[in-house]
Image (cartoon, grey):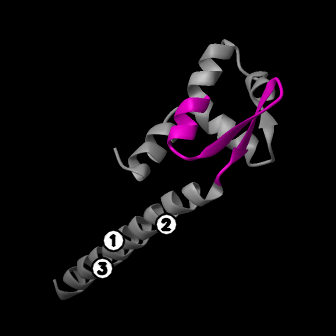
Amino acid sequence: MNLLDQTFNALADPTRRAIVARLARGEATAGELAKPFAISQPAISRHLKVLEQAQLISNERRGKHRHCRLRPETLDAAMAWLEFHRRFWAGSFDRLDAQLKSEKKSR
């Protein structure tokens, strides 16, 4: 699985998206990230592992705690992919609209 696939796979889960949103505000420990969720610490750890494997976060042990930080460059690559496809489809729909209007006028 390539990095883009891993990125979208990781972001497909609402818990992981919420973790990414939280980390967009700044670094947090795994325990801090777990607080808003009614799931176990091992489940949070699994989510963090998926995010780390997708290179969306970095995870560093400092003493007893794991500190997580967002890696925005991975999100930038996903955004570039989305933007390319948004422009492609917007242009395609604009051309289709123009063609349909042209055909309607010629009737």
Start-end of magenta stretch: 48-71
**In the rendered structure, which amino acid carries the disc numbered 2?**
Ala
Residue holding disc 3: 95
Q: Which mark is residue 80?
A: 2
Q: Name which residue lies at 55% across and 47% down.
A: 55
- Contact? badges 1 and 3 (CB < 8 Å): yes
Query: Mark 3: which amino acid?
Result: Arg
**Inter-mark Cα distance, 2 to 1:** 20 Å
Structural distance between the alpha carbons of marks 2 and 3 = 23 Å
Give neighbour class at mark 3: few <14, some 14-19, many 20+ (Cα, 10 Å).
few
The amino acid sitting under disc 1 is: Phe
| Image position of 79 (left or right of 93) | right
Residue 62 colored in magenta in the image: yes
Residue at 64% x, 56% y: name it: 72
- 2 vs 3, front mark: 2
Closer to the camera in the image, 103 or 41: 41
